[in-house]
């Protein structure tokens, strides 16, 4: 589940960055905001993976 969340967040970031390259200057601020939100989503997904990995290691579930 966490892996799919991470992949989804990364794809959202890649799509937002791609849209930013081809956006009309009139909508550039909206596209930039989408990139920033996608980066935050990716950061949160990474934190969830780190927390879950630490939890599993603490409980002996992870090598």
Image: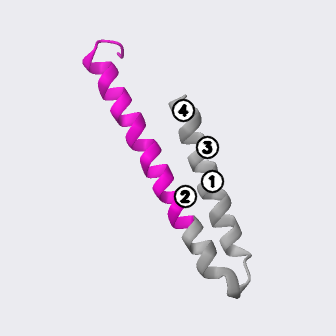
> Is 10 on the left or on the right of 43, as rendered?
right
Indicate the quadrant containing the N terminus: top left, top right, bottom left or bottom right.
top right
Tag on residue 8?
3
Q: In terms of sequence position, does the residue under pointer 1 or pointer 4 come before the other?
A: 4
Secondary structure at badge 4 equals helix
Local crowd at mark 1 within 10 Å, few (<14), some, or many (≥20)? Answer: some
- What distance separates the C-alpha of mark 4 from that of mark 2? 16 Å
Q: Residue furthest bottom?
A: 26
Q: In terms of sequence position, does the residue under pointer 4 or pointer 2 come before the other?
A: 4
The image position of residue 60, as x and y in percent, is: 29, 12
Q: Residue furthest top?
A: 60
Residue highlighted by disc 1: 12
Secondary structure at badge 3 equals helix
Indicate the quadrant containing the C terminus: top left, top right, bottom left or bottom right.
top left
Asked if disc 3 and disc 1 are in contact, CB closer than 8 Å, the reply is yes
- What distance separates the C-alpha of mark 1 from that of mark 4? 14 Å
């Amino acid at each position: 589940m966490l892996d799919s969340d991470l992949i989804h967040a990364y794809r959202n970031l890649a799509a937002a960055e791609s849209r930013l390259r081809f956006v009309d200057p009139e909508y550039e601020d909206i596209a930039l905001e989408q990139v920033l939100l996608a980066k935050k989503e990716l950061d949160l997904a990474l934190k969830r993976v780190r927390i879950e990995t630490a939890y599993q290691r603490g409980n002996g579930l992870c090598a």
